[in-house]
Each structure stands twice: as C-alpha cells, then as structure tokens.
Image (spheres, rainbow, N blue to C red):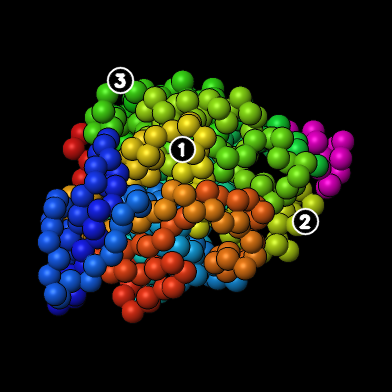
C-alpha cells in the first residue's frame, strides 16, 4: 500500500480543456478528480499556479540498449525522459543485435524491467532479412513493427525503397507498420553528386538537399498508395516536409484513421538556417529542412493532418557527431527537452496547452491502443507531470542528463520548468531529485478497431 498523494489546486490540462481541480493518487492510479479534502495519511502537493499534464508518451526513441550503451542506455535515457515529463516511450529496433526476433524482443523487455524508470514498449524490427518470418507471426502481440534505423546496418533495409517487400508486409501484417520514409536511390544519387564536388567533407548545410524533399515525398506517396490498396495500418515516422503533409487527412477522427503520421520536435524547432551554427550536431535522417517546411509541419500539426509529436531521440557521442559528413552519425538527443520546446511555442502563441496534451499524451495512447494511459481520468495510471509555466532556466552541460553529455539545445533558455513527474503513481522526479526505487512497467495495449 503506497501513501496516497493529493495534488491540490493545479490547472489540469486534459481532453481539450483546462480546469482547476484536485487529483488524488492511490495505488498507482488516479483515484479521484474534483474537490478533495486532505486526510492525515495523504502526501499533499500544492499545485496552485502550476499546470498538470498527462505524462508525455514518446512514440519514437532510440535508447541504445542493448549493444550501443556507450551512447545511452535504458537507465540513463529514461531518467532524462522523466526529467522532461516523459513517462512512457516506444523504442526502435536498431540496437545490437537488431531486434528482429521474438527472442531478442523478449530479452529487451527483460533489460527494461530492470533499468527503465519510465514505462516502455518496443517495436519489432522488420527488414529484407526477416520479412518472411514476420508475416507468418501473430503481429497483434507487438505494439508495432518498424524498419526505422535498420538501414544503418546495411543498404536495402528501408521498406519505402522496396515496393514488393512493402506489398508483402501490408498484405499480411495485422499490427501498426511504422516506417522511415525516404527513397534511398534518390539520396544515393545526391550523395554521389555532392561527393564529386566536395569529397568527404560536404558542408552540413547540404544535408537537406542530399536527403531531399523529393526523396521523402516520393517514398511517402508510394507507401500510402500501397497501404490503401491492402487496408493496412501504416504510420509514417518523423515527417519533415510541407509537401508530405498534404498526403494526410484531417476529416476523420484519429480512431478512424488507418494512415497516420508524426512530427519530431527538432523538425519544428530547427530549420536549415541552423546548420551554419550547429553543423553536424543537427544532422538527422530525415534531414531538418527549410523554414517553409518547418512552418508547414506546425500548420499540419495544428489542423490534425499530423497526429503525434515524438523526439526520435538518438544519442551519439560528440566524437561520433563531430566528423566529416559521411562519417558523422545521424541523430541527436532530445527527450529531456521536448515538452519544454513545445511549451516555448505555447509562450509564443503558436499552439495551445490543450493541443500539446493532445499530440504528446492523448494521441500516442490512442494510436497505439495503450491501456489506461495518456489521459487524466479516474481509474487510469497516474502518469502525470506538474509544470511551472513561469520559471526560466538555461540548458547547459551541468543539467543535461543524457549519457552522451551534450545537446543541440545547449545555451537555450526555456521559460517553463518541469517540476514533478509521476510514473504509475510514484513521484519519480521532484525538482531535480530522483526516486529510483520503482521501475517503469511494460505498456499494455489492445488492438486497432478497424
């Protein structure tokens, strides 16, 4: 029996509205919402003037466990996540080994049960090597299958580049299929052209020209066409172009969409003008593109063509990043700062608090059919984050929690502060102090109704 926790007088941001009320947490769940009198055995937290959000659910991270733990691991990166108000995550399969079998997936869950401070789930990897096995599996027992990151292992692993493999998967797979959408043949032709001109040391600013709008758009258009043909459940990861946003619909609710997409926070925060300042530190695949693309992504997020916000959190050491173009690893850490970034957009009048909660908390839970998560509702898990919207701090080496020890946001001053984070009713983060006695849980999920 845990001591009940009573959060008094916070502004609760949930399901399209913000109301001032009390929240009682008991036995890991939200027991009651309303006006609640304190009892002698309650731990009382004064939420006056603070905003209470559902815990953020990050639908795309690379926490590097197993096999790449010099960059990050399920303990360090989940700790950084919790400090940023992220209480649940879905991790991608491009670890070492790649998560291509049920056995390796089960082993990853076992590692997480011992190390992760946040709730967790994992995609099963699918590529040219295991697609024939995957289509014979009962994929409903996986939260989803994905090819993301597997193209780093060898060429030809991107589903978007292989219509015959995609057709086979879409015709047979009953789970969400989450894909990295770029046409590798377009990217390779651009790489060869720039290599001829610059050799190995291509300036970072050409990254969005090499991994171009055309390469993304053509791959996404083809994938959507095939998904419609087979009525498959397709999710396009980390959308980067304004052009692609017009391929998605907003005239039906999320629960009726078979084809969905997301935007990662760095594609909303940075644009190509930042390459001169940050160079390879903001080299991601797909690339950060133009200011027009950045604004187009925000517009599509606001009008519901884009369904989720994720981080694509992908730590590398500074040594791995600060190399010439072809050697510099793609990806960067973001999970500690994603909610602060979105709240900064709120401060600028670009997005509402309610829309932030929808895209970062409600919709990930809905899209992945998570059980009793993503909302502030009685009977749901008490995954919560209490935020001060009027407390400034600056990102520095001293407060970065990523194992890699750096961030492309260093020097950025945020006007909002994540004060407390609750995972399954446990106060795991409290103004810079962590309580690590309770580990996160594997995320339970149901099945898409279509």
Q: Residues within 10 Å of mark 3 (few under 14, many from 20)?
A: few
Image coordinates of residue 293 in percent, x first then y, are 58, 27
Q: Which residue is mark 3?
A: 251
Mark before the other along the chain sequence, 1 or 3: 3
Check disc 1: other Cα within 10 Å, few if <14, some if 14-19, many if 20+: some
Q: Which residues are magenta?
A: 190-202
Across and down, in percent, residue 63 comes to 49, 62
Magenta residues: mostly which secondary structure? helix
Report the mark closest to the observer, 3 or 2.
Answer: 3
Q: Residue at x 87, y 36 (%)?
A: 197
* CA distance separating discs 3 and 2: 45 Å
Residue beneath the point at 29% across and 61% down: 46
Q: Horizontal placement of 215 versus 425: left or right?
A: right
Give the residue pinned by disc 2. 323
Q: Which residue is mark 1?
A: 346
* Front residue of this view, candidates 309 and 178: 309
N-terminal label among 2 and 1 = 2
Looking at the image, which residue is at 35% across and 56% down?
A: 386
Q: Does the segment drawn in magenta span residue 195?
A: yes
Nearer to us: label 2 or label 1: 1
- The mark nearer the N terminus, 3 or 2, is 3
Residue 420 shows which numbered tag? Answer: none
> Judging from the image, what secondary structure is the residue with disc 2 in?
loop
Q: Quadrant of residue 75?
A: bottom left
Distance in Å between CA atoms under marks 1 and 3: 25 Å
């Amino acid at each position: 029996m845990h001591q009940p926790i009573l959060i008094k007088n916070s502004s609760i941001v949930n399901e399209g509205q913000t109301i001032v009320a009390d929240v009682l947490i008991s036995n890991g769940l939200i027991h009651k919402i309303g006006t609640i009198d304190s009892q002698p055995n309650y731990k009382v937290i004064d939420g006056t003037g603070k905003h209470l959000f559902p815990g953020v659910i990050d639908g795309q991270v690379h926490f590097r466990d197993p096999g790449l733990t010099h960059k990050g691991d399920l303990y360090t990166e989940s700790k950084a996540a919790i400090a940023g108000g992220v209480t649940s995550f879905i991790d991608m399969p491009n670890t070492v080994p790649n998560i291509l079998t049920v056995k390796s997936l089960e082993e990853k869950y076992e590692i997480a049960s011992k190390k992760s401070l946040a709730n967790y789930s994992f995609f099963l990897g699918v590529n040219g090597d295991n697609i024939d096995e995957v289509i014979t599996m009962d994929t409903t027992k996986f939260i989803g299958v994905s090819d993301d990151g597997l193209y780093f292992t060898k060429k030809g692993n991107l589903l978007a580049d292989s219509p015959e493999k995609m057709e086979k998967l879409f015709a047979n797979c009953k789970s969400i299929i989450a894909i990295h959408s770029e046409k590798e043949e377009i990217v390779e032709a651009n790489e060869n052209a720039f290599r001829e001109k610059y050799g190995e040391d291509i300036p970072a600013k050409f990254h969005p020209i090499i991994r171009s709008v055309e390469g993304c758009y053509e791959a996404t258009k083809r994938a959507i066409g095939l998904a419609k043909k087979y009525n498959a459940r397709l999710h396009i990861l980390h959308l980067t172009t304004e052009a692609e946003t017009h391929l998605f619909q907003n005239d039906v609710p999320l629960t009726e969409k078979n084809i969905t997409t997301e935007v990662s926070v760095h594609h909303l925060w940075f644009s190509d003008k930042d390459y001169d300042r940050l160079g390879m530190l903001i080299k991601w695949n797909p690339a950060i593109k133009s200011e027009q693309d950045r604004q187009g992504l925000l517009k599509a997020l606001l009008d519901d063509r884009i369904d989720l916000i994720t981080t694509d959190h992908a730590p590398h050491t500074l040594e791995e990043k600060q190399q010439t173009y072809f050697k510099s690893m793609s990806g960067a850490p973001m999970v500690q700062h994603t909610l602060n970034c979105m709240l900064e957009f709120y401060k600028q009048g670009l997005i509402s608090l309610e829309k932030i909660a929808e895209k970062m908390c409600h919709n990930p839970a809905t899209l992945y059919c998570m059980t009793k998560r993503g909302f502030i509702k009685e009977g749901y898990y008490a995954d919560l984050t209490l935020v001060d919207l009027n407390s400034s701090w600056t990102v520095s080496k001293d407060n970065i929690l990523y194992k890699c020890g750096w961030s492309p946001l260093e020097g950025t001053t945020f006007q909002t502060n994540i004060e407390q984070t609750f995972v399954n009713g446990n106060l795991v983060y409290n103004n810079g102090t962590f309580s690590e006695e309770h580990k996160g849980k594997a995320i339970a999920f149901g099945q898409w109704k279509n």
